[in-house]
Image (cartoon, rainbow, N blue to C red):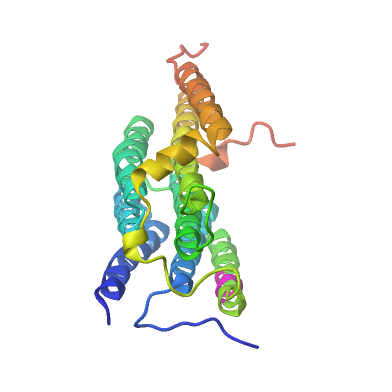
Amino acid sequence: MMLAQFNLGEVGLTHYLMLAALLFVCGLVTILTKRNAIGILIGVELVLNAANVNLVAFNRFSHGAAAGGVLLSGQVFAVFVIVLAAAEAAVALAIFLNFYNNFSTIDVERASNLKG
Amino acid sequence: MSSEAVLFYAFGGLAAASAVVVVASRNIVRMAVALLFALGGVAGLYFLLAAEFLAAVQLVIYAGGTLILIVFGVMLTSKSPFTRLQPRPIEVGIALGIGTLLLAVLVSGILLADCAGAFASEPLPADQGYPMQTLGQALLGDFLLPFELVSVLLLVVMIGAAYLAKARRRPE
């Protein structure tokens, strides 16, 4: 079995993927452990950033030629992810404010009205 | 070690350390500040990946917009800045177990993946970077439909967020 090249001195695609994996796991653990709803939102932002690092790194290391010259799909996807993250944060914070107005707390453990 | 490697370890280390602080901190304000540094580190990585436009967008929208939104959310939803919501120890244990397992799977997957055919080991030379007009042409050419859909989505989000966050008197 061949291992991918992992040379500490020379930065390659593998380095970026490793870093993105670490960011993703940090974001996931944040989502799982925080009881503050805004903490969960911060975890989601970390996860989205990890995905973006992957997209841009794959874009940088793929040499296929698009119709117009260079291949740019990864960067375009990353732009859309950033836009969606901003939109998601706005809606999520509006929902949290509503939640806080109704329950006087931001603890997600208390949001159990729909629990069977 | 090349200067690119040094910069990669600087920015990547900043992002990774800040992400770990986000996980470890119990104070929501500290988490927000650590997120700022993580976003800045990722923006530096975009510069290293020759995505200057994305780096600028990351700094302006994420660090400048989304983070301010989060800080405002923190200010509007906490009675005291020192309120801490402690998670249950068993939940922390389960989450850390899942995280460690996932990290192990991801790292071994990355190391075992055979990207030799699909991806080059060397990046595109710097002089063949990504000029910004190419990105603009891609957004208004190949990606015109998602671009327009995103504009509609932003309008919907703006109206929806304003409606949801509207101050409403609680029924007594």
Q: Is residue B46 above or below residue B143?
A: below
Q: Is residue A52 left or right of residue B100?
A: left
The answer to whether residue B107 is seen in the rendering is yes
Name the quarter where the C terminus of chain A is drawn. top right
Q: Residue B103: percent from the left, percent from the top?
A: 55, 70
Q: Is residue B105 magenta?
A: yes
Looking at the image, which residue sits at the far left?
B3
Residue name at image x 44 percent, y 16 percent: B166
Q: Main SS of the magenta segment?
A: helix
Residue name at image x 30 percent, y 58 percent: B44
The quadrant where residue A109 appears: top right
Q: Nearer the viewer, residue A54 or A102?
A: A54
Name the quarter where the N terminus of chain A is drawn. bottom right
All told, the count of numbered labels is 0
Residue name at image x 57 percent, y 85 percent: A3
Q: Is residue B163 above or below residue B46?
A: above
Q: Residue B9: percent from the left, percent from the top?
A: 31, 72
Q: Is residue B78 magenta?
A: no
Q: Nearer the viewer, residue B102 or A107?
A: B102
Residue name at image x 48 percent, y 31 percent: A96
The quadrant where residue B98 appears: bottom right
Q: Residue A91: percent from the left, percent from the top?
A: 49, 29
The answer to whether residue A34 is seen in the rendering is no
Q: Is residue A110 left or right of residue B67?
A: right
Q: Nearer the viewer, residue A81 or B32?
A: A81
Magenta-drawn segment: B103-107
Q: Residue A34: percent from the left, percent from the top?
A: 48, 51
